[in-house]
Amino acid sequence: MTGKKINKKFSFQTEIVNGVCGSCNLHTLLVGIDNTFFRCISCGRDLEQKVNGEIKYIKVDRHTDLAQHGKN
């Protein structure tokens, strides 16, 4: 294979929080990929954080439009 070797560096920062998973209903640790999306370490579901007076996590699946999120 010929060509230049390109090294692109990017920053990847995670956050670990306590919360109740909306999928398995367990009080567990949630790993945050960015400030909106989290993954439950108990069941593995992806969750989206919504804040309306209290923090709620909703399920994220393949039909969720991720392009509209994260532009805050």
Image (cartoon, rainbow, N blue to C red):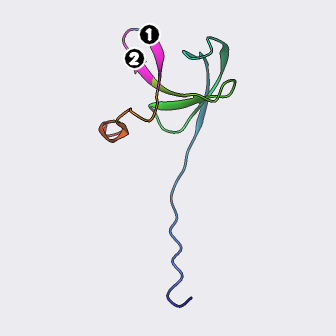
Disc 1 target residue? 54
Query: Magenta residues: mostly which secondary structure?
Result: strand
Residue at 46% in and 31% down:
61
Other residues around mark 1 within 10 Å, as few (<14) / some (14–19) / many (≥20): few
Above/below status of 55 relative to 5? above
**Quarter-wise, where is residue 17 in the image?**
top right
Q: Give the tally of numbered discs.
A: 2
Residue at 44% in and 36% down:
62
Q: CA distance from mark 1 to mark 2?
A: 6 Å
Residue lying at the far top in this picture: please name it. Answer: 53
Q: Which label was assigned to residue 66?
A: none
Residue lying at the far front in this picture: please name it. Answer: 63
Secondary structure, mark 1, is loop
Looking at the rendering, the stretch of residues picked out in magenta corresponds to 49-59
> The N terminus is located in which quarter?
bottom right
Mark 1 in CB contact with mark 2 (< 8 angstroms): yes
Q: Is residue 54 magenta?
A: yes
Question: Which is nearer the eye, 37 or 25?
Answer: 25
Residue 30: percent from the left, percent from the top? 61, 26
* In-image side of 62 versus 41 (left or right): left
Residue at 66% in and 12% down:
26
> The C terminus is located in which quarter?
top left
Residue lying at the far bottom in this picture: please name it. Answer: 2
Three-letter amino acid code at the position of disc 2? Val
Q: Is residue 18 magenta?
A: no
Residue 23: percent from the left, percent from the top? 57, 17
**Quarter-wise, where is residue 64 in the image?**
top left
